[in-house]
Amino acid sequence: MLNLNSPDDNSNRNSLQDPVSLNVGGEIYTTTLDTLTRCRDSMLGAMFTGQIPVLRDNQGNVFIDRDGKVFRYILNYLRSSSLDLPEGFSELALLRREADFFQIHPLLEEIHRCEAAVPLSCRGGPLGAMLILNVDSKVRVLHFNLRHGPENYELRTCSVRAFTVDLFCTWRAFLALLCERFSYRSSQGHSSPHPCNSRQNRLKLEWVPRPDELPQDQYDKQRYRGLTVFNADVTQSDDIMNVHQNQCEITDMQGFVEELLKVSLAEGFKVDLVTPDPAEILNCTSLRLVKC
């Protein structure tokens, strides 16, 4: 049971002395006033300098109605001014929420830096996040002059297939991951795709693979661009040339759907709906996945 009859500010300040025993969400901690007031402008600083009355449980421990499991990392940070988390720590979002509640701004900055250092592919995502894919392709007939020599041209015709993919995802970080994994390739080099709008969770990909019968200069003249997928096994130590060598070209829609499934399933998505034939998922025109 809690003693809800807090003493006045003066008696509250005088009653706090080392060591301080805390009951945080049922977890008991023993620490010092120096640690708890390390960040004076935080809520803990205000509580343990007598600016905010404290509550006590029936054992005399100062009671704080917050998550007790991650509070240990907050205490460790206040002691050492260093965020020391175990390998594979998966509660960064909860720790950030608690640090924000206590208004420990230096810790929040450390958490943001820690989150930024985690690759997107290793971050968790919201359960129930939805990914919707719609694909289309059209064949275009291209006429061009093939130069054999001075004033010697031959009229040629070839067909090119233009692919279009419209993606919508409620988990915006996953769209960012796709923009890292896929890349456009043109005469200007490699470039990353971008979401359609900074306020929308949509991504549109358009590319035209170069057929063998179309010379590279004619392909470039039409301002076509191909689509490649990045090999996730390439390490950060690989140089730029090796990275480009480990990009595979997407030459048909089946190849794109296959690569998309590899990425999305690895992130915890499950196939929810396939149109028109669930048995032919690589030949789908529409696909819906849900993160479980």
Image: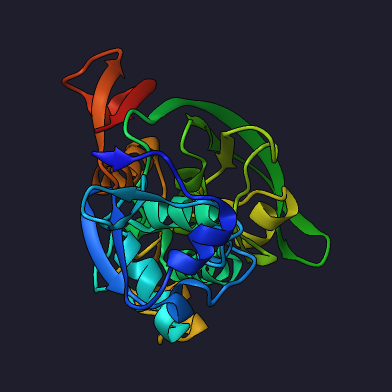
Going by the image, does 157 lie left or right of 124?
A: right
The residue nearer to you, when weighing 147 against 4, is 4
As rendered, which of 267 and 188 lies closer to the eye? 267
Nearer to us in this view, 185 or 58: 58
Question: x, y percentage for residue 253?
Answer: 39, 36
Say left or right for 204 vs 234. Answer: right
Percent across and percent down for residue 149 are 75, 67
Residue 210 in view: no
Q: Residue most toward the left?
A: 279
Residue 26 at least partly seen? yes
All told, the count of numbered labels is 0
Provide residue 95's location: percent of width, then percent of height: 40, 57
**Quadrant for the C terminus in the image:** top left
Residue occupying image coordinates x 51% and y 47%: 209
**Which residue corresponds to the image point at 43% horizontal and 65% vertical from the top-left?**
15
Here the colouring is rainbow
Q: In which quadrant of the rendered view does residue 247 lie? A: bottom left
Q: Is residue 89 above or below residue 208?
A: below
The foreground one among 35 and 51 is 51
